[in-house]
Image (spheres, rainbow, N blue to C red):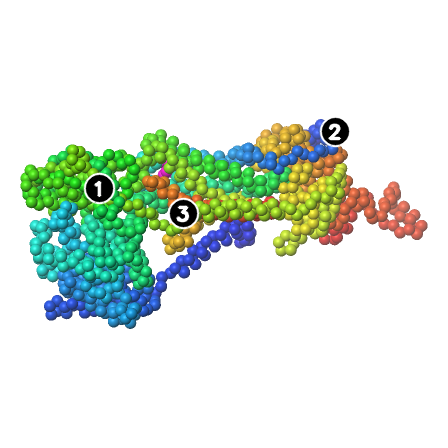
Amino acid sequence: MTERELSKVAATRRGVHDRLAALDPGRPPTYDPRKTLRLRVEFARQIKRRRTQVAFGLLIVLPLIIAIAFQIGGAADSNAPQLVGLATSGGFNFALFTEFASVGFLLVVVVALFCGDTVASEASWASLRYLLAQPVPRSRLLRQKLAVAGTLCVAANVVLPVWAFIVGGLFFGWSPARSPIGGSFGSGASTLRLLIVVVFICGQLFIVAALAFLLSVSVDNPLGAVGGAVMLVVVSSILDQITALDPYRHYLPTHYNYAWVDTLSSPIRYDDMIRGTGLALVYGAIFLGIAFLRFDRKDITS
Amino acid sequence: MTLAALRERLRSRSIRLVLVAVLVLVAAGIAIGVSTSSPSVSTRSQFIPGTPEGTTKVQLDTTLYLPETTPAPAVLLSQGFGGDKSDLATEARTFAEHGYVVLAYSARGFGASGGLIHFASPNYEVRDAKLLVSYLASLKQVKRTGGAPQIAAAGASYGGGLSLLLAGSDPRIKAVSADITWNDLSHAFFPNAVGSAPGVFKKLWVGQLFGNAFGPEASVTCGRFAPDVCAAYQASASTGEPTAAMRALMKQASPATVIDKIKAPTQLTQGEQDSLFPLGEADANARGIAAHGTPVSVVWRPGGHDSPALGGTEAINAAVTWFGKVFGGQVALKQPFTFAEADGVVSAATGDASQQTLQAAGYPGIAGTKRDTREVAVSGRPQRLGSPAGGAPAAITSIPGLGGISNRFDQALMVLPSVSGQTAFFQSARLSKSLAIAGQSTVRLTITSSTGRDVTLFAGLHDLSPDGTSELPSQIIAPLKLTGMRPGVPRTVTVRLPSIVRNVLSGHRLVVSVSTTDFAYQVPQDARSYTVALASEPAGSAGSTQVTVPTTSGTAVSAGHPIAWLLVGLGVCLLIGGGVGFVIVHRRRVLRSDPDLVDVPVSIESLVKEYAGGYRAVDSVSFRVERGQVVGLLGPNGAGKTTALRVLVGLITPTSGTVHVFGEPVVPGAPVLARLGAFIEGPGFLPHLSGRENLRLFWAATGRPDDEAEFATALDIAGLGPSVDRRVKTYSHGMKQRLGIAQAMLGLPEVLVLDEPTNGLDPPQIAEMREVLQQYALTGRTVVVSSHLLAEVEQTCTHVVVMHKGKLVAAGSVMEIAGSDGVQLSVPDPAAAAKVLAAAGIGSQLVPARRALEDVFLDLIGGDE
């Protein structure tokens, strides 16, 4: 390539130099920290990412796969847990079963992905330092990122049961929820229960979200943040299986993950769900508090 | 992966964080596991003489369990019917681990013990137990209080019955725990839901029970049974009516006869899935013992004879707690009542229905005037039923010995029993609110026999859900037998329905069923025909009557108030939120702006950045950058240039020293940084977006209006052509570099900070860039550019700051720095000039021209480059 061709590629047109030459001395910018990194902007940054699209794609495909599996393989045999056995009885039960199947791992991974990746991936792309030098105030950056990641998490938590309800309804009919302890609820009561389930699970996953977010601001490697959060959840779930750890295991972050099945009692038993929510608030507040404190002072070397 | 790579990876912060967290969790788990490991228990097996059979000596096979510390209270542990002392090992060990001396033994006629089975006879089994109590009383390991040995009696089923009989005849027993046992054998073997006369023979269960002791090879002989017991049983079982001898045997083997003598505080645990000894047996025991002012605790636990796999642990734990209370001296007359609700909740672990434990303030009894009750109206026409000859086909409700299968029998047959013409149903309307049944409901029925003088029927209370499935709670039905009937003459009776615990949900119906047959009971062998109707009460309300249902509102047993958890959660949130906010705001208050520096784009004062381990990346660096200058930050790799620039844009907090931009101190997020544009240590873009989208989003993130951005200028400087709409991940290094510089110039900032901008650019592009920067400075703006290339700085910059090993070595205009070491003289013929100079007495040497700054630079940083 000749020098002449090279400079064409470089393509800095003469006009730029003229334009620069004609510039006034700069005027102070109209900067307002409260307008930096608005939610709309952060959404645009995140929504177009392949990982966001793949995660939601998975959540859309999963109920279809389960429904087709039930359709081909027939209903669960009588030895299966009753929540599984009831899965094909209608949209509501199918949605509940899908939640039961996903809350232990799939939703954990999705939430850890959205919250663990959000700051760490910026660090790994080196775009974090440019955002901070604009400057986006640090706690504002965390707040906006948390708001967007949190919204994506809630969206995932709403999309899964609602879509599972629709898929279950199309495959198995629209009958109201039936409980493993016998009896069924009306459509209104079923909807209310499903709503409580979604809200409670969102609360429980707040722990995962906060932990992933803490790791995300602590490390420069998205895999470390997401993987670390998932790994701690898995370890906590394993420890929770050891009944010898009573009563200490009641304070494990995953202990109340399935307390939402109490919505299938009549009347709904709120005790464990209240405990789980309280525990989630404590863990979440601690993790997020550390995240904000650390990031506020952190030397950005990525 | 090589070891070095592995070590490198382990050093990474994320992995370390996770490893530490996992280690902490696992260590905590192990620590807790170790600290709760069981205390040691020693055992001693021996034979102890029992009551002789006539003149034959009888030895009882016993095992003594000694706890870690003695003396301790003792527990005499008796077995269930058909077993021996080895079945008691787990239970005995649990007691011993909780600090009790335990004597477990095989009852006479069982296991390795000698003698014959007299079925809980006061002259044999009970006397044996007294001998064992005497043995325990002689042991020095058994604790004494006020001279009296502290001895308790415990057991399940047969062992429970023996314990009660023992407590009723031996005052040395200070506490009793009797699990799933009987009050009156004639009620248990010949139950009758109307009146108190012996009723229908429970042939399947009783046969199973006695069969246990006949032994496999001797099922037609009497095995180890005492001949009188054997003969009485065989005579009664063949007719389905108790003989006089059988009645006498059952009477002497019933705690009901000695219950008024029991002074020891007693706990009665009874299984809810138990058609052999239903809840009514424990209720009779509880009422009998409490009538004389003895404290009684009643627990309805899951499981029972129909479901032996369930509830054992609950029973043992309840017994341990009870003995702890009694020997601890804190046993009040009024004891809380604990009961299990099978299928009360959905298990969080499995998604199956599972039982929950509920607690009420006091034991209310299974029925009676003190109970809270609800009346539920049921209706239905009088129904004519046939009882087939030979009693077959028969309805099947539960099958003894099949354990879990019979417990779940309804799952296979989730419809109301349907042998046609044999069952009458009386349904309620749909319940408007749920009904928590705990105990024995009653209903009044009018029964007419059109054939015989006696009537045998089976009543049940079903839960019918709206989808048509029905459940018979606990699989228990109540047999009833009426005698002295005249054909065609109706009789109205109050039927005691089975005692159950069941939460019937709203929208469900209660159904009273009345059947003529049941597989588990002896029914008349001749064909019968009955009419069953609801008693028309109150008068005139034909075809409808009230079922009186005992209700109990227990509260779920669980630790503490859940609301406290939520309050603590909210409190911690507020506390941490407030604390973090306060700390962050407080940290900001240190630095002041400097009005003298308002016109100075960059002023760095004694800047120090020390990393962990004492390494000083920047050490006491001070310099100023004035408007219109192009300042080159020059130094070899590792000189601290990038660290200084990172401090300048607020990415790194300095250890000491200050940085002011236009007089404002630089801290992370300082608003004055908006007047800076930065390109530091390479570009940073979102790889999944195009170059144009990246610039647009970057600018959008500043929150400043688009007309300040000067996108066209920036894109021209990047010079990417059509590639600007390709995704950044497809760009070459040079393209990213140019886009990064363009990004720094968005909004044409007053100070442009560029770190190594020419990396990856080719020579024409470098020349372009040089011109752009000089033009930029000519507008009165300021450029700070770092480089390790001398020529680059010399050609681009007006001023230079030289750094080496974190220290500032020199600062000034390129002219000053380069010209600070003597002057240069240029001549066409250096060799001749040197001769002339030498002749004139002036020493000279030849130096190559135009290398001034490089010389200076090399001088400044010393000889180590």
Which one is nearer the viewer's eye here, A37 or B162? B162
Dominant SS of magenta comes to helix
- The residue that appears at 18% across and 68% down in the rendered structure is B50
> According to the image, label 2 marks what residue?
A22
- Badge 1 marks a residue whose secondary structure is strand
On the rendered image, what quadrant is the C terminus of chain A found in? top right
Q: Are marks 1 and 2 on the same chain?
A: no
Q: x, y percentage for residue B162? A: 20, 60
Q: Chain of mark 2?
A: A
Callout 1 amino acid: Thr
On the rendered image, what quadrant is the N terminus of chain A found in? top right
Q: Is residue A120 visible?
A: yes
Residue A138 against residue B608 in the figure, above or below: above
Q: Chain of mark 1?
A: B
**Quick check: is B320 in the magenta stretch?**
no
> CA–CA distance between discs 3 and 2?
71 Å
Residue B233 against residue B851 in the figure, above or below: below
> According to the image, label 3 marks what residue?
B562
Q: Nearer the viewer, mark 3 or mark 2?
A: 3
> According to the image, label 1 marks what residue?
B548
Q: x, y percentage for residue A273? A: 40, 44
Callout 2 amino acid: Ala
- Badge 3 marks a residue whose secondary structure is helix
